[in-house]
Structures are given as C-alpha cells and as structure tokens.
Amino acid sequence: MSKGSDSIRLLLSDVDGTLVTQEKVLTERSIEAVHKLHEAGILFAITSGRPPRGMAMLVEPLDLETPIAAFNGGLVVAPDMSVLAEREIPGDLVAPVIQLLESSGLDVWVYRGAEWLIRNLDAAHVAREAFTVQFQPTVVETFDGVSAGVAKIVGVSDDLDAVASASASAHDTFGDHVSAARSQPYYVDVTHPEANKGGVVKFLSARYEIPEAQIATIGDMPNDVLMFARSGLSIAMGQSGREVHRAARRVTASNDDDGFAYAVDRFILPTIERREV
C-alpha cells in the first residue's frame, strides 16, 4: 500500500494558525470536528510551540486524552499536565543561542519549566502572547545564569527577513545540536535537536503502535513541515505560504474559514470507509 493510502488512525494538529482562528478562537465547528474523530475511533493529538499551560484551555472542550506536545515536542505532557517526556536545550548552548538571536536584532524569550522569561514587557508580541497562552511572563534584568532546564528560546521581531535570517544562522551555527524553525513569521523557535514536530509523530507512532503511514498531520508554518514528512497524510492550511503548501499532500481552507473542520470532513473521516472495506 503506498504512503498516504492507509486509513487514518490518528490526527496530529498544530494549534495557532490551524486549530484556532487568527483571534485564537476555538470555533464550534472545530470542536465538533474533533468530537467526530473521537466517535469514529480516530485518535486526536495537538502539538505547538506554546508552553503546556498555554494549551490547557483546549483539554476540556476537545475531550483530549492523548499526550500534548508543547514547545514543538520539547515537553510532552498528559492532559492533567503531568510530564511524560522532556528534551532540554544543552545548557552550554543557551547563552550562545541568546547571543546569536540578539545580534540579529531580535528580542529573546526563554522558557524554563513553567516560567516564561523576558526582559522587556513592552516588546513586540508580548501582550499578544500573554493573551494567547493565558498567563503572564516573568520580567528579568538579564538571562545571565539561565542555562539549565531551558526547553525553548524564541527570537521575536516584526522584521520578518531578520527572523528568517536568524533561523538560518542558528541552523548553520549550531548544526544538529539544536532545532531552529519559524513557528510564526515573527518567531523563530530554538529547541533541543529532537524537539521538533517530526519527533512528535515518531513519539505518538511508538506510543500507540500506529504506523506513521496511518497518521495525518495538519499545520500552517515551516515548523510543521517536519511532521508532514513523517506522516502518511499531510494537510496545509489555506493561508500557509508556498513552502508549506508544497510540502503537504493536501491543502484545506484557511483557519479563519474553518479549514481544520473542513479537512477533517473532507480528508480524514472518509478514510474510515477504506478501513471498513
């Protein structure tokens, strides 16, 4: 059976730009679509660059029972927020990564344990991120001494070319010692090298003994491409850029047009018929 032709047994979804609207709203159609998956016996899981606390609000409306992969897979938790797996950035690389991002003109955020550390409360996108994850950051004067237990470092700027350049520079400078990818046009996420969404597919495949060819993935940003490559069916959101569209097997509507729900109805649920034949 060729890749992508297997019936789907698990759907892994990105959150921002995919499962929720641009205004971070989880629509009734998206909730209904996930419940349809449950009823059909298809597992549903989420992954995001968000911290675990920033996805806790999705557990109840979606009746989540599968692991939640935060920080692009850097920290995997159960729905009750207990830790299942953790991958931290090597301590000796934390300061050099911060230096590289700052030298590129980006503001820096550091996620350590349950903490979100920043240096400037008024910097770009801080207020928006606090609204999204529903908790406030901790302001520190310096990141000096912050090395152990860091799950993710984020470079932030509205200079999108600078963000793209910093992402490439991090990859070139640190090679396979970190993973660097854009989770939004204005964010570059730096994590442990195995903390990427492709690794999340691998983790879920092993945990549930489901072949990767029977896993579907859906997302909208370049950091979703790695999970596309490991899954049997990959779906790009309509508002995604050309790079993401080209990496996916299917393209759905935008997140503001309930593209997630459309994808479930159009691409995922019909595979049940193949399973029952």
Image: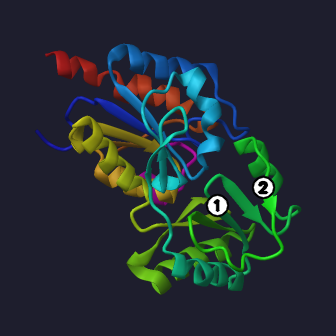
- Count all numbered tags in the image, as a single digit: 2
The percent coordinates of residue 72 (x first, y second) are: 50, 54
Amino acid beneath label 2: Pro
Per the rendering, the mark at residue 257 is: none
Task: State yes or no: residue 243 in magenta.
Answer: yes
Residue 150 seen in render: yes
Corner quadrant of residue 232: top left
Q: Residue at x 69, y 56 (%)?
A: 115
Q: Residue at x 36, y 28 (%)?
A: 43
Amino acid beneath label 1: Tyr
The percent coordinates of residue 33 (x first, y second) are: 49, 21
The percent coordinates of residue 219 (x first, y second) are: 49, 45
In the rendered view, does 68 fall on the left or right side of 52? left
Residue labelled with disc 2: 137
Per the rendering, the mark at residue 111 is: 1
In the rendered view, does 35 fall on the left or right side of 136? left
Q: The C terminus is located in which quarter?
A: top left
Residue 30 seen in render: no
State the SS at label 1: strand
> Dot 2, crowdedness within 10 Å: few (<14), some or many (≥20)?
many
> Could you give the CA–CA distance between mark 1 and mark 2, rounded to whole angstroms?
9 Å
Q: Which residues are magenta?
A: 236-245
In the rendered view, does 27 fall on the left or right side of 195? right
Check the image and report above or below for 90 versus 109.
below
Q: Residue at x 20, y 36 (%)?
A: 5
Check the image and report above or below for 70 versus 267.
below
Check the image and report above or below for 210 versus 168.
above
Q: The N terminus is located in which quarter?
A: top left
State the SS at label 2: loop
N-terminal of the pair, mark 1 or mark 2, is 1
Corner quadrant of residue 2: top left
Check the image and report above or below for 17 versus 151.
above
